[in-house]
Image (cartoon, helix red, strand yellow):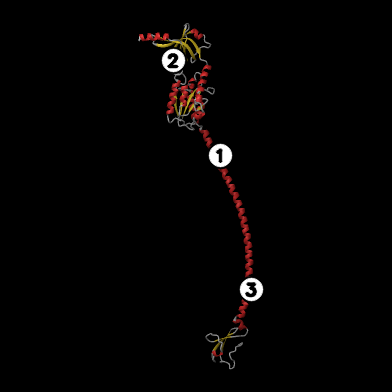
């Protein structure tokens, strides 16, 4: 072990100096000591190095070096044989300015935009009423409280699947990606919210990390970005299917407002009722108009028919009266003719009809020998008689009785 350590020490001592970028976790400066100690970590992986630097280098910086600052250090690697630990001996430190960070983010933004990760066509529509909401946020954070309380205030029955992760630091990206994969694989989760409160540009760098952005783009479940405040705009906002300006806004966007929905239902019901009543009123008015028109038409038809009936009745009466008059005349003429041809008329002129006891009309005097009882029918009535026999020389001529 000692030999190996010695060999490694010699090997690293021959290595050239190099530039290393990282985030300052801790700065240790002891009064009166010429050497200062820094802990430098990689922002993408959970790895850190101890850095030793002369105090004059820190004093030469334009601004004091504070925890969380991004820097690049020019240093040589060295191995401490007794502890077996690797450290960096720096001779120059240069803070990575915000302008450089923004330039890197702009380069990443252009690259992802060229690949189509920001296209509107690939963004999925948020569900109207999710069965469960996946929430990725810091442990016991205000962002979690804002999302949950505002969502339940709008829809009390909403369910959450919360994944508490680190939202800044070297472990943030890995933990967020892992939590995102778990929620995306859960069939009961219909939407995922990634939420974090405000912070500096450096604090929000994990939400512009390429690994995280590609993981969000590959999700099958719609993702809502709720990072920082209104002015904060990490690249996650561009990749996510929906952007919320704050965690509070995310709580309002993922579920509908039950009160507003009930108001909308009441309004829709009132509109439908008004539309139905209006339609019924219009139809009733049309029915009344048709009834009036039909009544007018019917009255006109009835009036015309009544006039025709009266005219026909009058014509019928006139024709009937004329026919009756002609028939009366005919009856009178026939009566006169009948009366003229009637035996009674003959009897009225003085003739008589002689009948034997059997009622047969006698036409020959020889048919009534003497002693035959006879019946004489006169105009005024019947008369009984007895035959004296044929009168001699009378012949068969007949005359008035």
Residue 112 position, x and y percent, is 50, 24
Query: In the rendered structure, which disc, 3 or 1, sits on the residue that comes first in sequence?
Result: 1
- Looking at the rendered structure, the secondary structure element under dot 1 is helix
Q: Which mark is residue 271?
A: 1
Q: CA distance from mark 2 to mark 1?
A: 66 Å
For the C terminus, the image quarter is bottom right
Q: Which mark is residue 366?
A: none
Contact, CB < 8 Å: mark 2 with mark 3?
Answer: no
Q: Residue at x 60, y 81 (%)?
A: 344
Q: CA distance from mark 3 to mark 1?
A: 84 Å
Q: Residue at x 63, y 67 (%)?
A: 319
Looking at the image, which residue sits at the far front? 114
Query: In the rendered structure, which disc, 2 or 1, sits on the residue that comes first in sequence?
Result: 2
Residue 6 position, x and y percent, is 38, 8
- Looking at the rendered structure, the secondary structure element under dot 3 is helix
How many C-alpha atoms fall within 10 Å of the one at disc 2: few (<14), some, or many (≥20)? some
Residue identified by numbered label 3: 329
Q: Is residue 276 above or below residue 374?
A: above
Residue 181 position, x and y percent, is 43, 26
- Looking at the rendered structure, the secondary structure element under dot 2 is strand
Mark 3 vs mark 1, foreground winner is 3
Residue identified by numbered label 2: 48
How many C-alpha atoms fall within 10 Å of the one at disc 3: few (<14), some, or many (≥20)? few
Q: Is residue 117 above or below residue 71?
A: below
Looking at the image, which residue sits at the far bottom? 392
């Amino acid at each position: 072990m000692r030999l190996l350590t010695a060999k490694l020490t010699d090997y690293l001592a021959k290595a050239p100096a190099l530039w290393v970028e990282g985030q300052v976790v801790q700065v240790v400066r002891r009064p009166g000591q010429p050497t200062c100690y820094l802990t430098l970590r990689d922002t993408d992986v959970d790895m850190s190095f101890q850095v030793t630097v002369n105090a004059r280098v820190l004093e030469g910086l334009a601004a004091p070096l504070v925890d969380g600052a991004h820097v690049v250090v020019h240093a040589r690697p060295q191995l401490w044989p007794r502890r077996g630990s690797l450290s960096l001996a720096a001779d120059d430190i240069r803070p990575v300015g915000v302008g450089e960070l923004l330039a890197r983010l702009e380069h990443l933004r252009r690259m992802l935009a060229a690949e189509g990760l920001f296209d509107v066509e690939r963004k999925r529509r948020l569900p109207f009423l999710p069965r469960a909401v996946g929430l990725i946020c810091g442990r016991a954070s205000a962002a979690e409280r804002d999302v949950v309380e505002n969502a339940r205030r709008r829809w009390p029955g909403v369910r959450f699947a919360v994944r508490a992760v680190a939202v800044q630091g070297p472990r943030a990206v890995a933990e967020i990606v892992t939590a995102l994969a778990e929620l995306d694989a859960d069939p009961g989760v219909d939407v995922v919210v990634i939420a974090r409160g405000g912070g500096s540009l450096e604090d929000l760098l994990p939400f512009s990390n390429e690994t995280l952005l590609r993981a969000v783009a590959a999700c099958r479940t719609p993702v809502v970005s709720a990072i920082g405040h209104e002015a904060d705009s990490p690249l996650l906002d561009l990749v996510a299917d929906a952007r919320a300006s704050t965690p509070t806004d995310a709580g309002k966007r993922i579920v509908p407002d039950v009160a507003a929905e009930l108001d909308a239902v009441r309004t829709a019901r009132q509109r439908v009722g008004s539309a139905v009543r209006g339609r019924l009123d219009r139809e009733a008015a049309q029915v009344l108009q048709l009834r009036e028109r039909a009544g007018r038409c019917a009255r006109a038809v009835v009036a015309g028919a009544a006039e025709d009936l009266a005219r026909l009745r009058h014509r019928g009466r006139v024709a009937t009266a004329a026919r009756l008059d002609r028939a009366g005349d005919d009856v009178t003429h026939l009566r006169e003719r009948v009366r003229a041809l009637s035996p009674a008329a003959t009897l009225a002129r003085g003739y008589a009809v002689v009948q034997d006891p059997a009622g047969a009309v006698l036409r020959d005097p020889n048919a009534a020998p003497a002693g035959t009882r006879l019946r004489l029918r006169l105009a005024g009535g019947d008369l009984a008689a007895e035959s004296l026999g044929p009168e001699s020389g009378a012949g068969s001529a007949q005359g008035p009785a």
